[in-house]
Image (tube, grey):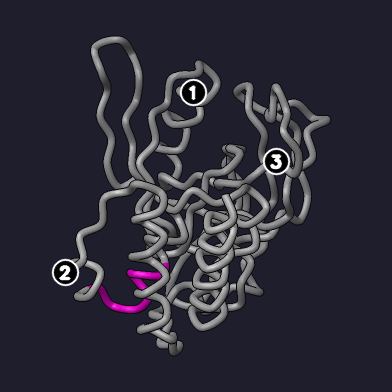
Amino acid sequence: MSGAVHSLDTETLPETLPLFPLTGVLLLPHGNLPLNIFEPRYLNMTIEALGRGRMIGMVQPRHAQPDPVADTAELYETGCAGRIISFAETEDGRYLITLLGVSRFRILAELEPAGGYRWARAGYESFAGDLGVDAGATDRPRLLEAVKAFFRVKGLDADGQALDDALDEALVTSLSMLCPFEPREKQALLECAGLTERGKLLTELMEMALQEAAFH
């Protein structure tokens, strides 16, 4: 499954990706995603990825499935390729890794499973902007107001100073990945065209959650 490589601007991205389907888990470009790997097939996937560019394709199943690796489990067409930037092995044989989001991708075709997990041919052409810094504008005061209220209602800890100091892209990316939204909402955040659209949707999702909480 080594395959050719696909060049996109200054990055060389793999034409084929091992797929890690996880419901409700979101990886965005430039975001950091820690993962606790313990299933044998994904332990195999991690070792394979370490030897072939350290890239893994994170993607969500469309529906809740007992076994998302199964051929019958339908996946969303859009995922995000992440590069392993840290790796550690625990005494009980688990792998603790961190993925750095590189670029979103579209599943062009699924390939024959190998190593016990799914593979896909990936296309990146629609997401060339993921490789650079997104300088899109956000309604920062509205976003921060919604974030702080959302964290209070959900009983989550928030470092107000860190939120105030974060750059717009880092703020929107980290909050989109961390906040406990529904899988379909996470997918909508992934598929936003850019920072402006993602920041607007993120704010709206938190405001809707606050409105629902007010009626309970």
Instruction: Say what amino acid the circle numbered 2 marks.
Output: Gln
| Residue 168 magenta-highlighted | yes
Q: Secondary structure at mark 3?
A: loop
Magenta-colored span: 166-172
Whether residue 160 is situated above or below residue 53 in the rendered picture: below
Picture coordinates of residue 71, whole percent (x, y)? 79, 30
Q: Earlier in the sequence, mark 2 or mark 3?
A: 3
Q: Pointer 1: what residue?
A: 44
Residue at 45 percent across and 23 percent down: it is: 43
Q: Say whether residue 167 is magenta.
A: yes
Tag 3 or tag 1, which sits nearer the N-term?
1
Magenta highlight: main SS: helix
Residue found farthest to the top: 92
Please state the horizontal and vertical placement of residue 177, each as a whole percent of the image: 45, 55
Position of residue 200 relative to residue 214, above or below, is below
Residue under label 2: 161
Image coords of residue 87 (percent x, y)? 28, 35
Label placed on residue 61: 3
Instruction: Say which amino acid is labelled 3.
Output: Pro
Q: Could you tell me if the residues under marks 1 and 3 are in contact, i.e. CB atoms within 8 Å?
A: no
* Rendering coords of residue 112 (x, y %): 75, 33
The quarter of the picture where the N terminus appears is top right
Q: Residue pushed farthest front? A: 215
Whole-number angstrom distance, CA of label 1 to CA of label 3: 20 Å
